[in-house]
Image: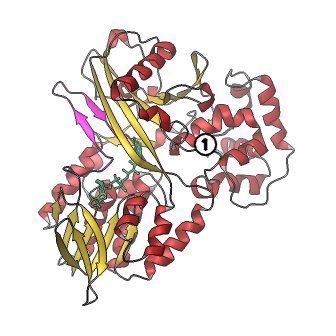
C-alpha cells in the first residue's frame, strides 16, 4: 500500500505518524511545498537562549488528542505549564489595561462582585447584561457570536468582552462566526439554564470553571524548547520508521489513473498512490481537487480564511516592565493595530535570556486585515506605538521578528457545520481520500491531531 500525505504541517505529520503505527509495511510519503516542515508551527531559538514562537505557542490540555500524541512520542516530560503568576489576562480599554475580572469566562461573569467592581464595562452595560436573567432562550438554531451576545448580554458585552475574548481566538468577525461550530457549550448553557449569568454562576459554584480569569490558562501547556520540538520529534520518528519526508515539493493536483489508483501530480512529475491525505488549508485542498471533483473543490474553497502576523520583540528587561499576567486582548472598537499581545517571557518560564523581556504581538485577522497591507517596518512601528501607549515601553527593541501567516486562520461562518457535513459526504465518494486540517472540525493543534488519527483509522482500518 502506498500512501501520500500532502502537507507537512502538524496535521500531515500527525497523520503520517498514526498511519505508520497502523501500517508498518506501507510506503508512506509526506510532500511539503515549503523548505521546512511544521507549517504554522515554527519556533525561533536565538544563540543566547531566547525561544520565540512565530505561530502557535500553546496546546490546550483539555482536548486529549494533543497530549496523547505528545505521550506517544515520549515527550511527556517536556510538557511545560503556564507560570502560576501568568494565569490572568487583561483587556485594553482606552489607554490602560483592565484585568479580566476573576470568574469571567469568555463572555459572561461567573462571580458577581469582581465583575460588578471592574471598570471593564460601564454601569449601563452591566445593567443591560443583568437583563439576561429575564430574556427567554433562543430557538437553538445556529447563530452568530454577535447576534447571540447582543441578544442576551447587550452590545457593550459584545464589544468589550466577547468580541476580543471569543472572536479573538478565531481572529473572526463576530457577526459571521458560527457559535454552533466554535462554542456550542454556550448554546447548551442557554438551553439548560435559560440564562448565561445563571449558567455561569452554577458552573462556577460547582467548580467547573477554574479560578483563573479570562481564558483558563491552567489548561494551556507548551513543550520545553518550543512547540517546534513536536515537529522535530515527529519528523525524527517518521524518518526512523521509513517514512519519506520530502520538502520543496508542491502538489498541483490529484486525479484517478486508468488503473483506478490516485495520481498525485507535482510540478513536472507524478506519483501513484492507493490513499491520499490532503493535510492543507481548505483553500489548498480545493485547488488540488479541482479536476477530480469540482463540486467538492468549490465547497472547500467556500471556507473563508483570515490572515494574521505575529511580531516578536526582545527588549532589555529594564525597558519593558510587564505586568504579572499572560497578556492582553484589544477590542476592535479600540481601533488599534494590535489584536492581542502575549507577555511571552512571563507566560512560560525559561525561554528568555537573563535581563531580557519578550512580547509577541498579533496583527490582522478578519476585522483588521488592512493592518497587514503595510510593510514590516510600518507594522512594527504601529505595534510599538501601541506598546508605548498601553505598556509604557518607549525604548527600541533589540530584536524583532515579523512572521506573516497569509490565509492561515479558518473562519467558521454561520452554516459551517452543515458545510463540513456535506464535505465529509463528498469525501466518502472517493474511497482512499482523506481531508484534514483547520478548515473542518477545529483549528487548534489537538483538534488537528484528532482529525489525523481519525483519517488514519479510516484509511487503514
Ligand atoms: C499565529 C498563529 C497562532 C496560533 N496559535 C495557536 C495556539 O496557540 N494553539 C493552537 O492549538 N493553535 C494555534 N493556531 C492554529 C494552529 O497553529 C494551526 O491551525 C495549525 O498549525 C495548522 O496546521 P496544519 O498542518 O493543518 O496546516 P499548516 O500549518 O498550514 O500546514 C499545511 C502545510 O501544507 C503545505 N502545503 C500546502 N499546500 C501544499 C501543496 N499543494 N503541496 C505540498 N504542500 C502543501 C504548507 O506549506 C504547510 O506547511 C495558531 C495559528 C497561527 C497562524
The kind of secondary structure the magenta stretch mainly shows is: loop
- Residue 38 position in % (x across, y down): 27, 50
Write the start and end of the magenta stretch as one range.
33-60
Any part of residue 148 in sight: yes
- Residue 328 position in % (x across, y down): 51, 28
Q: How many marks overall? A: 1
Whether residue 59 is in magenta: the answer is yes
Pick out the residue farthest to the bottom: 259
Label 1 SS: loop
**Residue 288 figure quarter:** bottom left
Q: Nearer the viewer, residue 383 or 83?
A: 383
Q: Which of the image's four quarters has the N terminus?
A: bottom left
- Residue 40 position in % (x across, y down): 33, 47
Q: Which of the image's four quarters has the C terminus?
A: bottom left
Q: Residue at x 29, y 32 (%)?
A: 52
Looking at the picture, does residue 229 appear above or below residue 95? below
Q: Nearer the viewer, residue 394 or 191?
A: 394
Category of crowding for the residue at label 1, using alpha-carbon neighbours closer than 10 angstroms: few (below 14), some (14–19), many (at least 20)? some
- Residue 167 position in % (x across, y down): 58, 42
Looking at the picture, does residue 134 appear above or below residue 288? above
Whether residue 54 is in magenta: the answer is yes
The verdict on label 1 being within 8 Å of ligand 1 is no
**Residue 265 figure quarter:** bottom left
Q: Nearer the viewer, residue 70 or 458?
A: 458
Q: In this figure, which residue is indicated by the disc labeled 1?
A: 209
The color scheme shown is secondary structure
**Is residue 245 rendered to the left or right of residue 365?**
left
Any part of residue 61 in sight: no
Amino acid at each position: 500500500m502506498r500512501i501520500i500525505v500532502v502537507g507537512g504541517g502538524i496535521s500531515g505529520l500527525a497523520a503520517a505518524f498514526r498511519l505508520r503505527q497502523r501500517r508498518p509495511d506501507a510506503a508512506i510519503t509526506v510532500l511539503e511545498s515549503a523548505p521546512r516542515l511544521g507549517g504554522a508551527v515554527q519556533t525561533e531559538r536565538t544563540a543566547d537562549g531566547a525561544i520565540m514562537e512565530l505561530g502557535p505557542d500553546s496546546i490546550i490540555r483539555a482536548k486529549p488528542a494533543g497530549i496523547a500524541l505528545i505521550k506517544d512520542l515520549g515527550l511527556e516530560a517536556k510538557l511545560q505549564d503556564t507560570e502560576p503568576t501568568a494565569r490572568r489576562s487583561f483587556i485594553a480599554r482606552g489607554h490602560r489595561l483592565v484585568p479580566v475580572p476573576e470568574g469571567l469566562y469568555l463572555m459572561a461573569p461567573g462571580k458577581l462582585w469582581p465583575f460588578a467592581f471592574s471598570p471593564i464595562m460601564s454601569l449601563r452595560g452591566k445593567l443591560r447584561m443583568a437583563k439576561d436573567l429575564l430574556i427567554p432562550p433562543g430557538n437553538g438554531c445556529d447563530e452568530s457570536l454577535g447576534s447571540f451576545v447582543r441578544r442576551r448580554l447587550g452590545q457593550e458585552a459584545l464589544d468589550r468582552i466577547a468580541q476580543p475574548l471569543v472572536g479573538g481566538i478565531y481572529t473572526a468577525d463576530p457577526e459571521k462566526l458560527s457559535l454552533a461550530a466554535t462554542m456550542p457549550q454556550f448554546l447548551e448553557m442557554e438551553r439548560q439554564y435559560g440564562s448565561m449569568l445563571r449558567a455561569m454562576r452554577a458552573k462556577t459554584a460547582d467548580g467547573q470553571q477554574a479560578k483563573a480569569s479570562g481564558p483558563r490558562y491552567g489548561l494551556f501547556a507548551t513543550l520545553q524548547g518550543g512547540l517546534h520540538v513536536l515537529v522535530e520529534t515527529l519528523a525524527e520518528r517518521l524518518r526512523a520508521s521509513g517514512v519519506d519526508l520530502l520538502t520543496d515539493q508542491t502538489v498541483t493536483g490529484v486525479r484517478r489513473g486508468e488503473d483506478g489508483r490516485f495520481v498525485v501530480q507535482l510540478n513536472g512529475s507524478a506519483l501513484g498512490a492507493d490513499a491520499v491525505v490532503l493535510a492543507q488549508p481548505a483553500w489548498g485542498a480545493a485547488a488540488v481537487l479541482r479536476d477530480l471533483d469540482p463540486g467538492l473543490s468549490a465547497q472547500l474553497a467556500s471556507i473563508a480564511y483570515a490572515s494574521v502576523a505575529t511580531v516578536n520583540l526582545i527588549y532589555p528587561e529594564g525597558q519593558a516592565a510587564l505586568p504579572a499576567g499572560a497578556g492582553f486582548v484589544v477590542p476592535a472598537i479600540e481601533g488599534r493595530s494590535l489584536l492581542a499581545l502575549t507577555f511571552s517571557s512571563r507566560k512560560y518560564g525559561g525561554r528568555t535570556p537573563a535581563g531580557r523581556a519578550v512580547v509577541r504581538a498579533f496583527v490582522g485577522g478578519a476585522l483588521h486585515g488592512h493592518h497587514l497591507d503595510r510593510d514590516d517596518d510600518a507594522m512594527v512601528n504601529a505595534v510599538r506605538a501601541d506598546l508605548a501607549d498601553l505598556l509604557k515601553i518607549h525604548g527600541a527593541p533589540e530584536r524583532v521578528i515579523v512572521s506573516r501567516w497569509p490565509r492561515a486562520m479558518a473562519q467558521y461562518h454561520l452554516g459551517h457545520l452543515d458545510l463540513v457535513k456535506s464535505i465529509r459526504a463528498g469525501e466518502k465518494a472517493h474511497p482512499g481520500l482523506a481531508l484534514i486540517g483547520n478548515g473542518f472540525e477545529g483549528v487548534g493543534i489537538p483538534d488537528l491531531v484528532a482529525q489525523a488519527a481519525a483519517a488514519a483509522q479510516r484509511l487503514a482500518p
